[in-house]
Image (cartoon, rainbow, N blue to C red):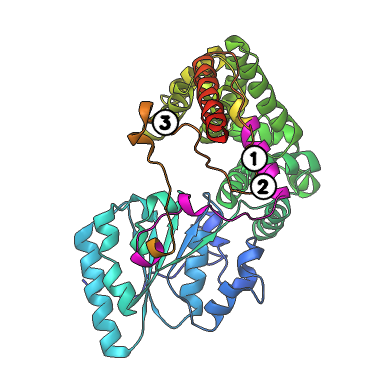
Amino acid sequence: MDLFADEPPAPTATDRSAPLAERMRPRTLDEFVGQEALIAPGRPLREAIEHDRLRSIILWGPPGTGKTTLARVIAATTRAHFIAFSAVLSGIKEIREVMAEAEQARRRSGRRTILFVDEIHRFNRAQQDAFLPRVEAGDIVLIGATTENPSFEVNSALLSRATVHVLKPLDDADLATLLDRAEALLDAPPLAAAARERLIGYADGDARRLLNAYENLVETVRTARRDNAGDAARTPIDEKTLEHALGEQLRRYDKGGEQFYDTISALHKAVRGSDPDASLYWFVRMIDGGVDPRYAARRLVRMASEDIGLADPRALRLALDAAETYERLGSPEGELALAEAVVYLAMAPKSNAVYVAYNAARAWIQGDRTRPVPLRLRNAPTSLMKGLDYGKGYRYAHDEEGAFAAGERYWPDDMEAQEFYRPAPRGLEISIGERLAELRRLNAEATLARKK
């Protein structure tokens, strides 16, 4: 099998058999919509592409933000071989074949190979390791695309040899530009202002979702108006027609719109207010309205940290478990795990003590100077550091009575001790508060004894 055989030509704008999103895929950087922070003229990534100096990169962003498109534009712009590779369909055998062919191609022609790996997070660590030798040798330029955080999903050795570029969801102006281009390409009836706004909100920053929905809408409208001619066929597409064409797909509120954030706010306040029924109501409203359940899961994790905290540490674990369960099951099965988390969070004892303490510590540090770490608190892994008294005088807590070095200071020497954290008198924080009060009493007695 020749892994370097040319790919079939990409569909052109006039190829009506191809999906609209594919027909509209840009061929050059100038045609690219969105991601100005990465590929605007003069930006480092664009300079590297245009001057054929690209090194391995990871493109991280939500679906429909242009990861695959950017990889194809890079392939068209540079003089390297290009191979598109799917982590869903390929395994270690295919990776090794590609690596061997890349090495041979470099030796034969001196040309590098650009290897685009879609959904690279789906490769396990052993599979990702297989890329390393050829990346280090310069035989391949790896372009990995992922919707997941590379810090957690990409091998650290591979990550250290690649630059991560974050692609953002397209904003409303970018989506409007795409709609204008699509309308011209399809010679479609214009969209009424309300329908246009609703469709952009439905897209939720995802160009592919926008174009697929718009193509479906135009086909539905043309089928319904087939017998009409002239002005009737060019009547603007209104919001009612949009709802009819997209049906249950259409969001009942727009992400980024006021109603979207109002609903999230209502859910958060109902959980904070310990009302499980109202919390479920707003949660289901969000899901029914089309919100990505993963987004709801992230909000639940935030609530567990901000409004429950150490009053019930199990809440955070349960919220994370619910998010993981949804990832495994998807919709609709995984939504039940999120609903379970909603009810648990609503009924858990509430405390924002950690949230308040964290903000207080941030405010203090932002307004303070950088104070040196006391020598006794520094680590001393080398003889030089030991000779400079790093770690000298440190009291190892486990050698002290009760595993507590009473009177020891862990603050900078020129700074007074602060009390950022004040446990709430609820849930587990009752016990934490009692423990903290006892430790502070022991510290005060030991400090007083030293002064005597």
Q: Tell me residue 394's x, y (percent).
A: 42, 46
Q: Are marks 2 and 1 in contact (CB under 8 Å)?
A: yes
At 36% from the left edge and 81% from the top edge, which residue is drawn?
A: 112
Q: Tell me residue 374's x, y (percent).
A: 53, 52
Query: Circle 2 is placed at which residue position?
Result: 365
Residue 166 shown left or right of residue 337 in the figure: right
Q: What amino acid is at disc 1?
A: Ala
Which numbered circle lies on residue 361? 1
Task: Residue 43: name its quadrant.
Answer: bottom right
Instruction: Give the class, few, some or many, for how many residues have Cα within 10 Å of label 2's Cα (few <14, many ≥20).
Output: few
The span from disc 2 to disc 1 (Cα, nearest Å) is 6 Å
- The residues colored magenta run 356-385
Which numbered circle lies on residue 404? 3
The foreground one among 380 and 38 is 380
| Number of marks drawn | 3
Determine if residue 252 is in view: yes
Task: Residue 238: name its quadrant.
Answer: top right
The foreground one among 360 and 175 is 360
Return the residue found at the far front: 452
Q: Is residue 374 magenta?
A: yes
Screen quadrant of the C terminus: top right
